[in-house]
Image (cartoon, helix red, strand yellow):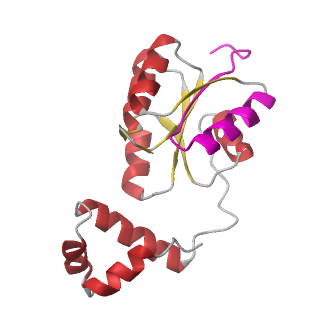
Amino acid sequence: MPADERTLLIVEDDRPFRERLARAMETRGFSVTTAESVAQGVARARETPPAYAVVDLKLEDGNGLDVVETLHTVRPDSRVVVLTGFGNIATAVAAVKYGAIDYLPKPADADDILSALMAPPGSKPKPPENPMSADRVRWEHIQRVYELCGHNVSETARRLNMHRRTLQRILAKRSPR
């Protein structure tokens, strides 16, 4: 990939975040194209394959990994970072298998994303300065099981061996920090 080519595709369904990130990356020297859905992301990736991409994992019309897969089909050397608010090991592994170079939890700022995009191949990321709290890890696990059960509260409660009403209270709250 030529060193001067700094084309970036941002696929994100959260409009304010997408626009803020696009402006921030433009000030850092990228030529930015945006998309708000899997369909738009795939179309833009095929029209003009970017050198770099930032793709949200969960989009309203599907899975962002479809965009990552398309990017690596049309341009194998593209460097893709996957963002998600619902991080877990299984989706991180899947993202890497599809060709992502990094996987960042939301909220990620432009500097974190830029560092991930520009990291030399094979470099090891620094350990997180603020690791997840035990409450956050528990919440993430509950969310993953809830998702695997098709958002069925009763089945999730059974699998987690917890009372259904307790689970409903946990699901109704915001995620812990």
What's the residue at 69%, 47% (across, down)? 112
What's the residue at 72%, 17% (across, down)? 3
Left or right relative to 24: residue 135: left
User: Magenta part of the protein: which range?
Assistant: 1-28
Q: Quadrant of the C terminus?
A: bottom right
**Place of residue 155 in the rendered image (x, y in percent of width and height, measured from the top left):** 19, 73
**Place of residue 99 in the rendered image (x, y in percent of width and height, measured from the top left):** 45, 33
The foreground one among 93 and 41 is 41
- Tell me if I can see residue 119 in this picture: no
> For residue 9: magenta?
yes
Left or right relative to 127: residue 172: left
The foreground one among 148 and 134 is 148
**Place of residue 62 in the rendered image (x, y in percent of width and height, measured from the top left):** 35, 39
What's the residue at 66%, 36% (across, down)? 19
Q: Quadrant of the N terminus?
A: top right
Reply above or below: 32 against 128: above
- Tell me if I can see residue 5 in this picture: yes
What's the residue at 44%, 73% (across, down)? 139
**Place of residue 113 in the rendered image (x, y in percent of width and height, measured from the top left):** 66, 42
